[in-house]
Each structure stands twice: as C-alpha cells, then as structure tokens.
Amino acid sequence: MSESSRLDARYGRRASNPRRTRLLVVLGLALLVALAAVLYLWSRSGPPVAVVTAYHAENAQLTVSLSITKGSGQHVSCRVQGEDRFGDVVGSVDVDFTGAATQVGRTVTFPTRTRAVTGVVDSCRVLG
C-alpha cells in the first residue's frame, strides 16, 4: 500500500465525482453561451441615442431640433425638455420615432411656462 493510499484510507478522502464535474462544466458553458447571445443582440440594436442639434427659445415656447440613432424598425419615444436658467423644467413633450430608418431628424415646438434657455433630451426608450 502506497503512502497516499494509506493516508486516503486513514483520513477518508472522497473520490472525485465525474458526474458532478461534468454537470458544472456544462452549466458553465451554457452560462457563457447565454451571456454571449445577450451581448450580441444588445450590440446589434443598442440603445437609442438622441442628440439635440439646435434650439430656439422664445418667451412661451421652445423649438428643438434633434437627431436620433436607433435600430432599424424600432419604435422609439424620447422626452424633450426645456429648462430655465436654474435648470428647472419649464416644458416637455414626448416625440415618437418609427420606421425603418436608423438615423432620424425631427424638429418639435412646444409651449413653456417661462422662458427656456436650453433644450435637452431627457430620456429615450424603445417601445417595440
């Protein structure tokens, strides 16, 4: 009897379980494949990106020109806000973008409570 066999018998070392090892390897690979699929799908469509290209403020209204980059065929809604000199929101409007184009530009005019000094895109979300 070798030294390691004698110590295994004395201290009760368990034999490795090949089924358990195989199960852990399969679960790990499945997790990696799922993660890769999610990252691939996210990189294809990506979140919509909106940029204000110009704005013109008057006493009671704001005109904002914006450009959006979205996935082809996505229906996206963006909230455009007018802010006063203190950063408070003085007016807002939701703008919908539909269609197959991935680059879309739009100009919107909306009323404000007081004079706005800037127009910003607060948020965009994919609706479908």
Image (cartoon, rainbow, N blue to C red):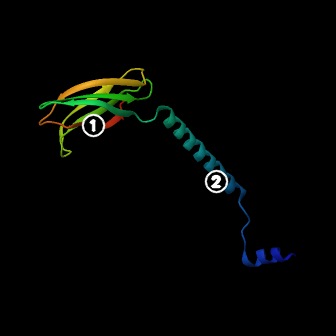
Quadrant hosting residue 107: top left
Which residue type does callout 2 highlight?
A: Leu
Residue at horizontal 72 percent and vertical 72 percent from the top: 13
Residue 76, given in percent of the width and then of the height, sits at 35, 29
* Foreground label between 2 and 1: 1
Residue 128 seen in render: no
Residue nearest the observer in this picture, 55 or 121:
55
- Disc 1 packing (10 Å; few <14; some 14–19; many ≥20): many
Determine which of the numbered discs, if any, sits on residue 20 in the image.
Answer: none
Q: Residues within 10 Å of mark 2 (few under 14, many from 20)?
A: few
Between 9 and 54, the one nearer to me in the picture: 54
Q: Position of residue 79 (x, y in %)?
A: 27, 34
Residue 93 shown left or right of residue 30 in the figure: left
Using the rendered image of the protein, determine whether residue 53 is visible from the camera's viewpoint. Answer: yes
Along the line of sight, the residue nearer the viewer: 15 or 110:
110
Distance from label 2 to label 1 (Cα)? Answer: 49 Å
Name which of mark 2 and mark 1 comes first in the sequence.
2
Q: Is the C-beta separation of discs 2 and 1 under 8 Å?
A: no
Q: Secondary structure at mark 1?
A: strand
Q: What residue does disc 2 label?
A: 24
Q: Residue at x 34, y 35 (%)?
A: 124
Q: Quadrant of the C terminus?
A: top left
**Residue 68 screen position, x and y as percent:** 37, 29
The number of numbered badges drawn on the structure is 2
Amino acid beneath label 1? Val
Q: Residue 39, image x and y in percent?
A: 53, 40
> Which residue is denoted by mark 1 in the rendering?
120
